[in-house]
Image: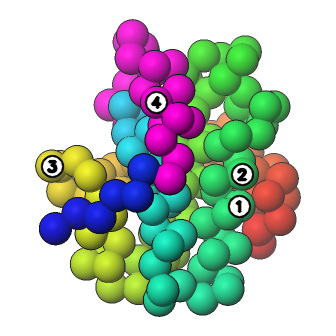
Amino acid sequence: MSIHSNKCGSYKEFLIESIKNYKGDFNKIIYYTPYLFSLLCDLLDDENLTKDMKHLINAALAYFVTPVDVIPEEIYGPYGYIDDIFLCSYVLNKLKDRLTIDKIEQYWELEEDFIVVLENCLEVSRKVIEEKNLKNEIFKYVGLE
């Protein structure tokens, strides 16, 4: 059973609109951008989160809405979400090690298997970020690691 608070609904709708016609590199993982964002928003309501877990989630959410991040959407269009997807996937991967996967999956709204989506998004985005040597810059930007 999925739990959706629609807390971040208008920004999620903005994300859906901004990627809807994208046909380019990594379009499969870029498709997940609004749903990963929404998952993090909804997960913030979970009573099992520690202060550190909330910090991780808030860092990823803040990165999404920052006007100029490491790969800015204003310059690169939807491809610019690759760094957002990386950070979001990184955070969710850390959370799955601290919470049960079932706890996270209850907030996942798509039919596709969350763990498969997460692993694919993390693998593909990490490869791009590491090829461009941007991982430390992203983490420094949000105060992680």
Mark 2 highlights which residue?
Answer: 62
Q: CA distance from mark 3 to mark 2?
A: 26 Å
Q: CA distance from mark 2 to mark 4?
A: 17 Å
Residue type highlighted by circle 2: Ala
Which quadrant is home to the N terminus? Answer: bottom left
State which tag comes first along the sequence, 1 or 4.
4
- On screen, residue 70 versus residue 23, left or right, reads right
Residue 111: mark in rendering: 3
**Of the two numbered discs 3 and 4 in the rendering, the one whose residue sits closer to the viewer:** 4
Residue type highlighted by circle 1: Ala
Is residue 136 within the magenta segment? Answer: no
Please state which of residues 90 and 20 is positioned toward the viewer in this rendering: 20
Instruction: Give the secondary structure at mark 2.
Output: helix
Residue 57: give x, y in percent of width and height. Answer: 61, 66
Residue 21: give x, y in percent of width and height. Answer: 39, 10
Mark 4 highlights which residue?
Answer: 13
Mark 1 highlights which residue?
Answer: 59
Residue type highlighted by circle 4: Glu
Residue range of the region highlighted in magenta in the rendering:
7-29
* Label 3 neighbour load within 10 Å: few <14, some 14-19, many 20+: few
| Mark 1 in CB contact with mark 3 (< 8 angstroms) | no
State which tag comes first along the sequence, 1 or 3.
1
Question: Is 63 located above or below residue 41 in the figure?
Answer: above
